[in-house]
Image (cartoon, rainbow, N blue to C red):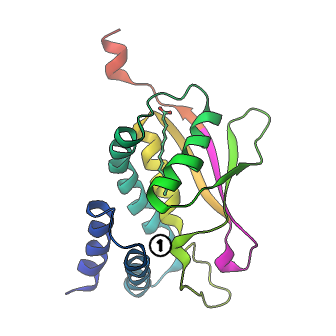
Amino acid sequence: MSASANARLGEQIWQKMPKINAEFFTLTYGAMVVQLMRDLEDVQLVNEKLEKMGHSIGCRLIDEFLAKSGINNCNEFAETADVIAKVAFKMFLGVSVEVASWNDEKTSCSLLVYDNPLTDFVELPPNINLYYSNVLCGVIRGALEMVQLRVECYFVRDTLRGDDVNEIRLELKEHIKDEMAEEYR
Ligand code: MYR
């Protein structure tokens, strides 16, 4: 199987088989990252690719999340962040995440991921600029886009790079106008 077909397979497994064994999933994700490193030969491109893959996963995942959680409309961004941290991470990765470091406007916060199952068994070579779990940022961005929230989402601390915690910064940029809904108003 070609390198890119392997990478595609990893993505498909993630999208279509959310209940697969966690260890197998973690190892599959790792194999996919390694393959992307080989194929793209540029760490920055790999970071971007992981984020984009996450985005397309997030766009699909949101329906399942809303259906299973029964959550529909968060009034405040703070509520949305809490739902991501406490419900979504739990549902999809089995871990709970802390929300911290809000800005005064309550449009930007950090998600502190103390235990990231994606990085079990993983060690990075020193001085590599890889955001190994960048797929998570894409998943969050894609899922929120589907509920009309445009966000920027990026890693600021990463235990694989020697930090004491994984910190994902989440910034609300815009409430996307729902043109269909506007038309029927
Ligand atoms: C709303 O504001 O209407 C509901 C917002 C729900 C947002 C849920 C986003 C799910 C993000 C999935 C992250 C998964 C990480 C493993």
The percent position of residue 43, horizontal first and vertical second, equals 52, 79
Q: Residue at x 52, y 47 (%)?
A: 87
Q: Is mark 1 within 8 Å of ligand 1?
A: no
Q: Which residues are magenta?
A: 157-172
Name the secondary structure under disc 1: helix
The front one of 93 and 108 is 93
The relative height of residue 136 versus residue 159 in the rendered view (above or below) is above
Task: Please indicate whether residue 13 sits to the left or right of residue 147 in the image.
Answer: left
Quadrant of the image containing the N terminus: bottom left
User: Can residue 175 be found in the magenta stretch?
Assistant: no
Q: Residue furthest bottom?
A: 125
Q: Position of residue 27 (x, y in %)?
A: 41, 82
**At 77% across and 40% down in the image, what residue appears?**
103
Q: Amino acid at mark 1?
A: Leu
Mark 1 — residue? 45
In this view, the residue in front, 49 or 125, is 125
Q: Assess whether residue 168 is covered by the magenta stretch.
A: yes
Quadrant in which residue 128 is drawn: bottom right
* Residue at x 53% of width, y 57% of height: 137
Name the residue: 41% across, 72% down.
Answer: 22
Horizontal relation, residue 78 to residue 5: left or right: right
Query: Can you give x and y, in whole percent of width and height, for residue 96 in the image?
Result: 60, 56
Name the image quarter holding the C terminus: top left
The tally of labels here is: 1
Residue 34: name its quadrant. bottom left
In this orientation, does residue 44 appear? Answer: no
